[in-house]
Amino acid sequence: MDLIVYGFAGVVVLLALLALGVPIAFAMAFTGIAGLWIVEGPMPAMAQAALIPWEHGRDFVFVTVPLFVLMGQLFFHAGLASDLYDGLRKWVGRVPGGMAIASVLACGGFGAVTGSSIATVATMGTIVMPEMRRYNYNARLATGALAASGTLGILIPPSLIFIFYGVMTETSIGALFIAGIVPGLITASMFSGIILVRCLLAPELGPKGPHASWGERFGSIGRLGPVAALFILIIGGIYAGVFTPTEAAGIGCIGVLVTASIRRKLTREGLAAALRGTALISAMIFAIIVGGYLVARFLAVTGVTDFLVEAIIAAELGRFGLLLLLVVLYFVLGAMLDVFGMLVLTIPFVFPVVTELGIDPVWFGVFVVIMAELALITPPIGANVFVMRRVAPEVPMEEIFLGVFPFVIGEIGVLVLLILFPDIALWLVEQMR
């Protein structure tokens, strides 16, 4: 039997395991090791099972992952995330749907600290949902806005997905961070506009929040300062070439610790919880990455990767044809796989075709992240929706998916703009160069 048949059979096994509810990291690791065992033998398979985690896990750039996760955990447990939302609510809370708009902006700000979509939804949902319930916000609007806005955590830098993509493709992580700024701001504006228009047409969806005097508004600027300062420090330092993304992650952690210490907000219990959360989230991410690399190795050995590269190139799809194919591919895979797993399985055969067509790897990184955002809020997986369901268990799952739908349309609009006007992502990067 040809090796490539084993490769495609392995893909079927992987999809079957996922359909049975096996955690993605274990499903990919089992498929990769079992496949290598069959096609190469037990000793080579076990050797690679030991070597691959070491080979990829020791990459110095991956140090940024637990550091950025820790920064977000410290930010949450120090109470700075609630300060961020409260400060923004004072400025926009009185406009129709203002509390939901404040949640969009707060998710963008928190995402700029954590780089994680799921952490953003879980954290901001816990803070914001009680407020929106108190003011009788429509549950579909509230949960949909929060689930969708959580995706800003992987687009507005720093982003764990950008880091992983940069490592896999050897693309500058600093350039990827800079490229995500403008698309992130456009996405946040798009989401805020959707909320405003809906609440202008149907005011009962998002009643006005409590009145805040101008004195309270200006006083809240101090609460918004830590996020702005951290963002400027991290992105400004990378943009100016003062430090690397890895160094920026460490500096960001120190910045949050100093801020929390000055404001006397971080308790010993909070610090311990932040460290535990960091360990759990980082372990989950690395388990998925290792499992993905094992499957990718199996697909490379069986020739599936080369077969797909040659088939796509031979099809002569052109730039727009390839991007349309990838939109469909990532929509389908996003319904079954975690974002990290989706990237580790597709980048080995997609990226060579992208570079062959002359598509800028930095621009493609932003394209991939926006597709990952869509995967996080579209059924049947929609990881952000499931997290939102845990935050608001009284809201049926179908209601949250219906609430997310207008934001999916908005996200697709941002994707179309990115394809038609690539400088949306590349202009700032060109200024940096």
Image (spheres, grey):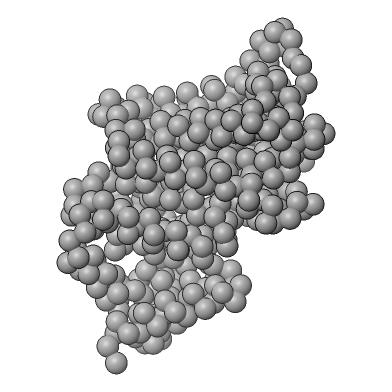
Residue 366 drawn above or below residue 194: below
Extreme-bottom residue of the structure: 1
Q: From where the camera sits, is residue 174 visible?
A: no
Lateral position of residue 360 relative to residue 397, left or right: left
> Residue 398, located in which quarter of the rendered image?
bottom right
Extreme-top residue of the structure: 215
Q: Indicate the quadrant containing the C terminus: top left, top right, bottom left or bottom right.
A: top left
Number of callouts: 0
Q: Residue at x 68, y 33 (%)?
A: 202
Residue 158 drawn above or below residue 276: above
Residue 361 drawn above or below residue 87: below
Q: Residue at x 23, y 47 (%)?
A: 359
Q: Indicate the quadrant containing the N terminus: top left, top right, bottom left or bottom right.
A: bottom left
Lateral position of residue 169 relative to residue 389, left or right: left
Q: Position of residue 2 (x, y in %)?
A: 27, 88
> Residue 247, located in which quarter of the rendered image?
top left
Q: From where the camera sits, is residue 155 visible?
A: yes
Q: Position of residue 210 (x, y in %)?
A: 78, 21
Q: Position of residue 164 (x, y in %)?
A: 41, 51
123 or 284, nearer to the observer: 123
Q: Residue at x 34, y 33 (%)?
A: 424
57 or 361, nearer to the observer: 361
Q: Residue at x 30, y 79 (%)?
A: 302
Extreme-front residue of the structure: 201
162 or 333, nearer to the observer: 333
Lateral position of residue 173 relative to residue 374, left or right: left
Residue 183 drawn above or below residue 377: above
Lateral position of residue 171 relative to residue 128, left or right: left
Q: Position of residue 157 (x, y in %)?
A: 46, 36
